[in-house]
Image: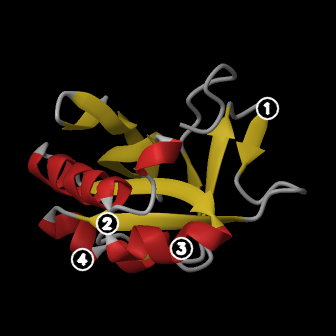
């Protein structure tokens, strides 16, 4: 969990979740954002953006090949302003192989965001566009 505090008060928080994934037969160290929240009284001051940008740097510095997560479409500009890029046509698949939970399930209006950090991930970034990317974390966390 990453926290941003102002004068000793937590104003924004998020989780960074990490795992190894296999995509098109290749293994990658992947991390993603989850549970991004800024207290209602602190919204509109740039705290969330600052924390999301710091999380991107944290993931890049962690040795992860890439960062992947979904967001609601109206939040696209927020995440892009923090350095993340929309991964066109990509769908993250959570759940399990027997009980998949895709980010394009009916009723969802999600975008996949990404950052490619290792040289190999940067070279192979095109393989993630318009792809279904299996995360399969299980049925408790469902998507990451």
Q: Position of residue 103 (x, y in %)?
A: 70, 54
Asked if disc 3 and disc 2 are in contact, CB closer than 8 Å, the reply is: no
Residue at 45% from the left image edge and 70% from the top image edge: 78
Residue at 61% from the left image edge and 39% from the top image edge: 143
Earlier residue among tags 1 and 4: 1
Residue at 25% from the left image edge and 60% from the top image edge: 53
Q: Which residue is mark 2?
A: 115
Q: Secondary structure at mark 3?
A: helix
Q: Position of residue 97 (x, y in %)?
A: 70, 34
Q: Secondary structure at mark 2?
A: strand
Q: Answer left or right for 22 relative to 60.
A: right
Q: Quadrant of residue 94?
A: top right
Residue at 34% from the left image edge and 39% from the top image edge: 11
Mark 1 and mark 4: Cα distance apart in space: 31 Å
Crowd class of label 3 (few under 14; some 14 to 19; many from 20; radius 10 Å): some
Earlier residue among tags 2 and 1: 1
Q: Which mark is residue 123?
A: 4
Along the viewing direction, whichever of 46 and 58 lies nearer the viewer: 46
Mark 2 and mark 1: Cα distance apart in space: 27 Å
Crowd class of label 2 (few under 14; some 14 to 19; many from 20; radius 10 Å): many
Q: Secondary structure at mark 4?
A: helix
Earlier residue among tags 4 and 2: 2
Mark 4 and mark 3: Cα distance apart in space: 24 Å
Q: Which mark is residue 99?
A: 1
Earlier residue among tags 4 and 3: 3
Q: Which residue is mark 3?
A: 76
Mark 3 and mark 1: Cα distance apart in space: 28 Å
Q: Position of residue 109 (x, y in %)?
A: 76, 64
Above/below status of 34 relative to 108: above
């Amino acid at each position: 969990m990453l926290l941003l505090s102002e004068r000793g008060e937590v104003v924004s928080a998020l989780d960074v979740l990490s795992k190894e994934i296999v995509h098109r037969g290749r293994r990658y160290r992947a991390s993603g954002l989850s549970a991004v929240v800024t207290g209602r009284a602190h919204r509109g001051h740039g705290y969330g953006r600052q924390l999301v940008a710091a999380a991107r740097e944290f993931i890049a510095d962690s040795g992860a090949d890439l960062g992947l997560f979904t967001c609601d479409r109206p939040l696209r500009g927020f995440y892009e302003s923090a350095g993340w890029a929309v991964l066109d046509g990509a769908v993250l698949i959570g759940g399990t192989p027997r009980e998949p939970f895709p980010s394009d399930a009916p009723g969802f209006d999600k975008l996949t965001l990404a950052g490619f950090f290792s040289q190999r991930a940067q070279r192979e970034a095109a393989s993630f566009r318009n792809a279904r990317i299996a995360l399969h974390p299980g049925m408790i966390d469902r998507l990451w």
